[in-house]
Image (spheres, rainbow, N blue to C red):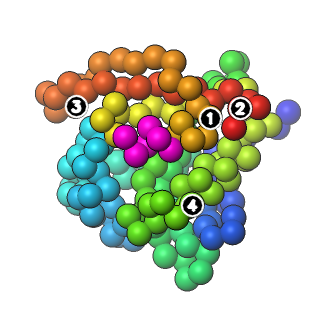
Amino acid sequence: MSDIELQPVLAGNTIRLRPLVPADFDALYMAASDPGIWEQHPDSKRYQRDVFRQRFFDGAVASGSALVIEELAGGKVIGSSRYYDWKPESREIAIGYTFLAREHWGDGTNRELKQLMLGHIAPWVDAIWFHVGESNLRSRRAVEKLGAKLVSQKSQELEGQTFTQLYYRLDKGNG
């Protein structure tokens, strides 16, 4: 089996995913600068430019597995997602660090995004993990709609604040 491409170019009906590069900062920050995107997220300050760069963007670029989400019509950057925690020996990977501009909430974009990413990764994995903050009800509902099951939780800390991280697992054939 060949090596998996963790930064593919994928196109659906309304969006295209492509590798995130350093030159994407301004366009991606424009999509991320709405405080409402982050209000349920444990890192609720990501709408701030410096926080976004330090606690999201720089790590996304360094990961070698982050993707930009663009509208097919016009190419506007509307968010990001990535693959991470790839474990070839157990055929598991996580999908996360996902956000979308609010104008794309509830319009099917997140489902299309996840279907593109799941379809791409399917030949290499038996399980996909989603790590979601307990208070992030939108993301919890979204992964549950995919068929992912809550299997564990763990206390985490960010800037002195404790939060509960939930671990959802989607087994092959359940998505």
Query: Label 4 is placed on what type of residue?
Result: Gly
Q: Residue at x 48, y 60 (%)?
A: 106
Instruction: Report which residue position mark 3 lands on.
Output: 158
Query: Label 1 is placed on what type of residue?
Result: Gly
**Placement of 28 over or under 59, stated as above or below:** below
User: Mark 1 or mark 3, which is nearer to you?
Assistant: 1
Query: Label 3 is placed on what type of residue?
Result: Leu
Q: Which mark is residue 108?
A: 4
Residue 10 place in picture, x, y as percent: 69, 60
**Placement of 86 over or under 56, stated as above or below:** above
Of all residues, the one furthest to the bottom in this rendering is 74
Q: Residue at x 38, y 64 (%)?
A: 102
**Placement of 72 over or under 114, stated as above or below:** below
| Quadrant showing the N terminus | top right
Mark closest to the chain's N terminus, 2 or 3: 3
Query: Alpha-carbon neighbours of circle 3 within 10 Å: few (<14), some, or many (≥20)?
Result: few
Q: Which mark is residue 147?
A: 1
**Distance in Å between CA atoms under marks 1 and 2:** 6 Å
Question: In the depicted view, which residue is nearer to us: 22 or 142?
Answer: 142
- Asked where in the image residue 88 lies, by quadrant, the reply is top right
Is 21 one of the magenta-colored residues?
Answer: no
Question: In the depicted view, which residue is nearer to us: 165 or 138?
Answer: 138
